[in-house]
Amino acid sequence: MLEGGRIDSKQAIFLMVSMVLSTAFLFVTSAVALLAKQDGWISILLAILVALLIAWLAVNLSMLFPGKTLFQFPEIILGKWPGKVVALLFIWWYIHLNAEVLRAFGSFLVSAFMPETPIIVFELLIMAIAAYAARNGLEVFTRVNQIILPIILVLIVILVILGTPNMNFKKLLPVFIENGAAPVIKGAVMPAAWMGEIVTMAVLIPYLNKANEAYKVAVSATLITGSFLIAIFMADIATFGPEVSAMWYFPTLNGIRTIHLANFLERLDLIAMAIWVAIGLVKISVFYWAAVLGSAQLLELKDYKPLVLPVGVIVLALSIMAHDSIMDLLTFMIGLGIFDNLIIFQVGIPLLLLVVAAVRGQGGSRH
């Protein structure tokens, strides 16, 4: 294997939680409230169900081809060249998705904290750290994440509790009746695309110490992430209401800024920045690692480390060129980006591969 690292189920759960939560932590409320209003928590519940189905697809595919990643078993299923095309598409997806995440990362820091600082400064720094993590392999950034994620989850819980004096839970009413089913379903699409990144399990499973626990890993990570997203959404809506929350880029950050206790506990928005930086780095590192690993497997190289720098340059260049503003970024995330992520790469191609493998009777026994 190009990657010699091995991780246990707990570490894999933590990694998948950080990977999804990092993007959704700041954007979930505005994205969902825009469509589903106060019923957005129901949208997130629907998104959890969709993510569980995507996890089932990814894990089933991987268990049919033990030791093979998402970049390898398409060639077994479809044949050499069609399989390589599918693998190349997934590599491109990880590179492009990482560029979008990096741009969101930089846009947040610039617009919310340091508007005079060029975005390239933050992106260069982040990519340098992520390149170091990807080069050192899966075990390195997984162990770091195992330390920081519990701290981050505790901080999120504390921030929600501290914000309760500013909350009015009547703003979550009425439930469902006012808006009907259509807005709730539309509101589920974006969080489903975020949580659908659990398809990355198809890259991770060959490196699990106990591959037979892959289902437990995927389900646990999805349920934990979904629970935190619902809590964040409900806290934001109870603080500002659905209309105001939908108008802001970062309602969660604004909610944290409203926390003032005893005239000394304030400016807790810096904690939000620390949370975003920490788990954002993990997500970028995971996608970076997946892209270079997949590229090396596609090219049948013995080592993926020589690809770390060129892939990083591509990600950085795409990130800088992709969008003119944060508004353009969010418009893309809500529109075409969702179609690409959810319909094609998280559901469409994995389902096609699973159906073809089943029809052809391919794959070994599941562990």
Image (tube, grey):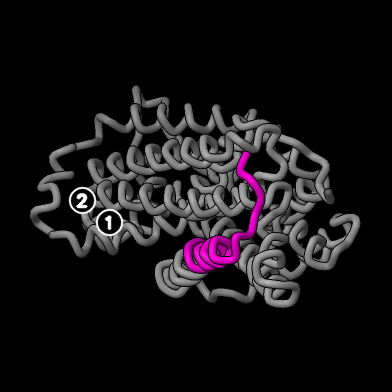
Total marks placed: 2
Which residue in the protein does label 2 denote?
Answer: 38
User: Does residue 31 appear in the picture of this structure?
Assistant: yes
Q: Is residue 318 visible?
A: no
Q: Residue at x 44, y 36 (%)?
A: 224
At x 67%, y 31%, the residue is: 8
- Can you give x and y, in whole percent of width and height, for residue 230 in the image? 33, 42
Q: Nearer the viewer, residue 106 or 214?
A: 214
Along the horizontal axis of the image, is 273 left or right of 182?
Answer: right
Q: Is residue 179 left or right of residue 260?
A: left
Per the picture, the main secondary structure of the magenta-coloured stretch is helix
Q: Are marks 2 and 1 in contact (CB under 8 Å)?
A: yes
Which residues fall within the magenta stretch?
A: 346-367
- Which of the 4 quarters of the picture holds residue 246? bottom left
The residue under label 2 is which amino acid type? Gln
Q: Is residue 362 left or right of residue 229?
A: right
- Quadrant where the C terminus lies? top right
**Frontmost residue, 284 versus 211:** 211
Residue 277 magenta: no
Looking at the picture, tell me which residue is in the foreground, 106 or 18: 18
Q: Give the residue type that dot 1 points to.
A: Ala
- Which badge, 2 or 1, comes first in the chain's sequence? 1
Residue position marked by numbered label 1 in the rendering = 33
User: Alpha-carbon neighbours of circle 1 within 10 Å: few (<14), some, or many (≥20)?
Assistant: many
